[in-house]
Image (spheres, helix red, strand yellow):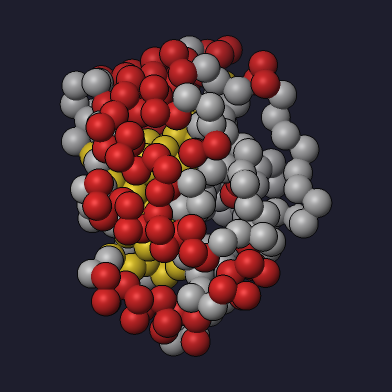
Amino acid sequence: MYDSFNRHINYIRVSVTDRCNLRCEYCMPAEGVSRMQHADILSFEEIVDVVRTAVNFGVNKVRLTGGEPLVRKGIISLVSMISQIEGIHDLGMTTNGQLLSEYAIALKKAGLHRVNISLDTMDEERYSRITRGGSLGKVVEGIDAAIGAGLEPVKINCVIKNTPSEPDAMLIKDFCEKKELELRYIREMDLENGEFYVVHGGTGGDCSRCNRLRLTANGMIKPCLFNDMEYNVRELGARESLQLALQNKPACGTVNLKGEFYNIGG
């Protein structure tokens, strides 16, 4: 399917939860955030309905995000349900890796194709400080488990302040080269002030090439991360919500005053 600017929209990012087992400095405050009410979170059946409808429109790439998707109870079942939808060529997940070593084999068996893993430093103390309590060792174990399970290519998402030449970013580069991992640098962004940048090694942030829509955990279809527009699938239905998002997808991002990265999925 194509939007009004003739961009081929074939990708939907699905936030399955707003909850996370980390509190990364650039994502949320140390005290955490107010969680969505359980009744507001889409059920697996509702998520599958939206994804199936999107695939009928021409979407063939699906990525599960959060929050942290692996904290969603029954996530393996959801992966299995989505993987059975005919027409999906790329089913991925973005994870912080803390639980990945436990789930990698099951995720692969359920039909997940690959994973993107967030990793911003190779210094254990800095990692714990940035994530407010995360374990670097668990991430490395998760990476190895993903490789072993065949969730490849394993891609690393590294958040940087300004440039890939920063010390932490260079250490991540060395680590990825040794393990033959694909690396993407993501410069820190600001939804409220409309500060976003093209991802180094990817296409995210390049509005002229944007090919995606987003589904939030509470059922909002968003045509653009840096925009307040959203369409409620429970009120409008999956088909109409997707159509409206496609028709009204802006040429370029501006600002987002209603959401946060942790509950939209980045």
In the image, taking residue 219 as reference, residue 104 lies left or right, namely left
From this viewpoint, is residue 222 visible? no
Residue at 49 percent across and 39 percent down: it is 70
Q: Which quadrant of the view contains residue 42?
A: top right
In the image, taking residue 7 as reference, residue 101 lies left or right, namely right
Identify the image quadrant of the N terminus: top left
Q: Which quadrant of the view contains residue 180?
A: bottom left
The answer to whether residue 181 is above or below residue 89 is below
**Residue with the most extreme right position:** 31
Residue at 60 percent across and 59 percent down: it is 134
In the image, 3 versus 125, the foreground residue is: 125
In the image, taking residue 59 as reference, residue 160 lies left or right, namely right
In the image, 105 versus 55, the foreground residue is: 105
Q: How many marks?
A: 0
Picture coordinates of residue 208 (x, y %)? Answer: 35, 56
Picture coordinates of residue 125 (x, y %)? Answer: 62, 75
From this viewpoint, is residue 123 visible? yes
Residue at 50 percent across and 69 percent down: it is 120
Picture coordinates of residue 106 (x, y %)? Answer: 33, 34
The answer to whether residue 111 is above or below residue 100 is above
In the image, 178 versus 89, the foreground residue is: 178
Picture coordinates of residue 29 (x, y %)? Answer: 76, 55
Residue at 44 percent across and 13 percent down: it is 45
